[in-house]
């Protein structure tokens, strides 16, 4: 498991039970959030556009990553390998899918290309192929041991170095790529807003500013990966240099934040205006009176022109 590389050792049995409970609870929240996005994609046909299809694949990866984290190590031997490698594979796939979303946004907004849907096969090859290569490489220098509810691995210095190369290096590469991509998108929209201010068409100015406010939220999306894995990175580096000195509070934050990655992704990428609109329309269809009491009309039928994902959806309808 990517979040539990350096947890055993000096920690007591009570500490490990606490960490197991934290991991199970946080992973359950991620599993629930990601499952909700998958259900929405399957139920609402209007969501089955290419942009949200990528979010669907992201949610599937998060579901499997969380599921194997919850299951833990049912026994030694084969199941130990299966749990450890499966979690590693799908966690890597999860953050790689975020790079495809960033790439799609950049290609659509900055480069004004409408061929992103043709790249779906390449996206699958890139995500699943890279995840497989990283998972296979992880076996080098691996010393599997059984501690409590997890299959603990990378207990040797070589294994820890390999784990850093096969997980944390691709992870921070994805973080840097996403940050650079969203920076370019937001900078371009800022320039478009300044140009619009000097034009006489006030409607165009208003639309551009609305899109700018909405797309500013995309700039926070790289922070999801940073928030999920910053403590894990620090914990892994500390464990590499001080293998006999475990820090419980750092490991606690490592396990808890990493296990919440699926929940963070489902909220940020999945719960957008198109999903909320689809849900509200179904509620309005079957329980119109209750919906009118719960939500104002502005929330039920909010114009997608003011939402960030419209930038992606526009190109798909052309």
Image: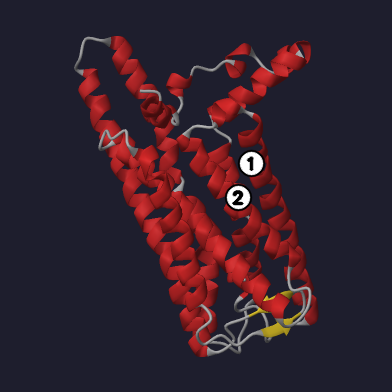
Give the residue displayed 47% in from the left and 80% down from the top.
Answer: 162
Query: Which residue is painted at 66% across and 68% down in the image?
Result: 252
Please state if 77 lies on the left or on the right of 107 as rendered. right
Question: Quadrant location of residue 308?
Answer: top left
Residue 35 lies, in percent from the top left, at 68, 45
Q: Which residue is mark 1?
A: 38
Q: Which part of the image, by quadrant, shows the C terminus?
A: top left
Tag shown at residue 60: 2
Q: Nearer the viewer, residue 137 or 307?
A: 137
Quarter-of-image position of residue 33: top right
- Which residue is nearer to you in this view: 284 or 82? 82
**Disc 1 + disc 2, Cβ < 8 Å:** yes
Quarter of the image containing the N terminus? bottom right
> Of helix, strand and loop, which one carries label 1?
helix
- At which x and y percent is residue 223? 47, 51
Is any atom of residue 250 visible in this view?
A: no
């Amino acid at each position: 498991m990517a979040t539990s590389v350096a947890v055993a050792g000096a920690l007591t049995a009570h500490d490990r039970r606490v960490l197991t409970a934290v991991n199970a609870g946080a992973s359950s929240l991620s599993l629930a959030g990601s499952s909700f996005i998958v259900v929405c994609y399957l139920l609402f046909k209007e969501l089955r556009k290419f942009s949200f299809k990528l979010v669907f694949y992201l949610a599937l990866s998060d579901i499997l990553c969380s599921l194997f984290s919850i299951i833990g190590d049912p026994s030694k031997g084969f199941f130990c390998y299966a749990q450890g490698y499966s979690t590693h594979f799908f966690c890597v796939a999860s953050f790689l899918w975020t790079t495809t979303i960033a790439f799609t946004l950049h290609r659509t907004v900055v480069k004004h290309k409408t061929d992103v849907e043709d790249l779906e096969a390449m996206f699958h090859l890139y995500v699943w192929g890279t995840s497989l290569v990283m998972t296979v490489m992880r076996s080098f220098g691996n010393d599997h041991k059984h501690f409590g509810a997890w299959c603990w691995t990378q207990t040797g210095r070589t294994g820890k170095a390999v784990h850093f190369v096969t997980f944390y290096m691709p992870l921070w590469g994805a973080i840097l790529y996403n940050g650079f991509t969203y920076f370019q998108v937001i900078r371009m929209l800022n320039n478009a807003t300044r140009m619009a201010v000097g034009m006489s068409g006030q409607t165009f100015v208003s639309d551009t500013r609305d899109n700018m406010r909405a797309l500013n939220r995309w700039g926070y999306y790289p922070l999801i990966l940073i928030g999920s894995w910053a403590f894990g990175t620090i914990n892994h580096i500390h464990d590499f240099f001080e293998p006999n000195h475990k820090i419980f509070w750092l490991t606690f934050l490592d396990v808890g934040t990493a296990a919440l990655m699926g929940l963070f992704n489902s909220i940020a990428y999945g719960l957008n205006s198109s999903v909320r609109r689809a849900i509200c329309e179904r509620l309005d269809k079957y329980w119109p009176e209750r919906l009118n009491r719960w939500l104002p009309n502005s929330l039920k039928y909010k114009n997608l022109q003011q939402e960030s994902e419209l930038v992606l959806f526009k190109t798909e309808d052309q």
